[in-house]
Image: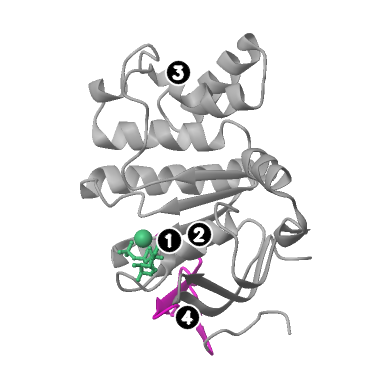
Amino acid sequence: MEPEVVVRDVVKYYGSYPALRGVTLEVPRGAFQCIVGPSGSGKTTLLHVIGGIERPSGGEVVVAGVRLGELSDDELAEFRNRNVGFVFQLFHLVPRMSVLENVELPLVLQGSPREERHKAALEALQMVGLGHIDPRKRPAELSGGEQQRVAIARAIVTRPRLVLADEPTGNLDSESARVVMETFLKLRSELGITIIMVTHNLELLGYCDRYARMRDGRIVETRLLVPEGGGDVEPAGAVRGH
Ligand SMILES: Nc1ncnc2c1ncn2[C@@H]1O[C@H](COP(=O)(O)OP(=O)(O)OP(=O)(O)O)[C@@H](O)[C@H]1O
Ligand SMILES: [Mg+2]
């Protein structure tokens, strides 16, 4: 089966600065891939090129069998809206909108009818374990962990194939972080989505089934994390299945 995400020899320059210097990574469908590495090593940049927020300067990104480099800007935006959900460290919820309106937002962009949007948003809130909260509340009336789960509900409301999370627990206490991780595991098993998560918190690696470590714009180690007994070290940049 073709991997859900293929990153091949990707290079990304900001001006003359190489933020990514030749990254190769394959993520199978349904995987929970973690990416770790020091500040400035290129983790966010890699998520952005995988999610089609930015285009690489060289190399190739294939998501769900689609070569992103062959899409026009409009097609890329459309692909992103339909297939990719983003979760950020600072939640990025709209403060003056209700929880429900925040979750509905991607569907507004898709032009879905109001009733459908409401239904999908309530379902998404249910799925992240927030079925009990009043969806008319503003984000500020929720705890940090609840706000992040609202952001996850917004990321999955379009039923994306892929969720990209950039330090989603960076601003959460450890209990809220645990709940967010459990939410990801549940979404993965119930919806079959693939998750790629950047984290600084090594304790969260226990939730992932594979990890990649970046340094200076390169992947320097990849590892399969097997729940019991160690895991299997691969050479840096190894392409599985070859
Ligand atoms: N828009 C940009 N313009 C110029 N340089 C950038 C831009 N975005 C990132 N960079 C540079 O590219 C490098 C990689 O940045 P990136 O944000 O991917 O790092 P990161 O691994 O996510 O770091 P952190 O853990 O601090 O979030 C950094 O040196 C950064 O300064
Ligand atoms: Mg970053």
Q: Residue at x 65, y 15 (%)?
A: 116
Q: CA distance from mark 4 to mark 1?
A: 13 Å
Label 4 CA crowd tier, 10 Å (few <14, some 14–19, many 20+): many
Q: Which residue is mark 4?
A: 218
Please provide percent x and percent y for residue 114: 61, 10
Figure quadrant, ligand 1: bottom left
Residue 136 visible in this rendered orientation of the protein: yes
Query: What is the crowding at mark 1: few (fewer than 14 residues within 10 Å), some, or many (at least 20)?
Result: some
Q: Classify residue 117 as left or right of residue 15.
A: right
The CB of the residue at mark 2 lies under 8 Å from ligand 1 = yes
Extreme-left residue of the structure: 173
**224 left or right of 68 in image:** left
Q: Nearer the viewer, mark 3 or mark 1?
A: 1
Q: Circle 4 sits in a helix, a strand or a loop, which is it? A: strand
Which tag, 4 or 1, sits closer to the chain's start?
1
Q: Quadrant of residue 57?
A: bottom right
- Tell me: is circle 1 under 8 Å from ligand 2: yes
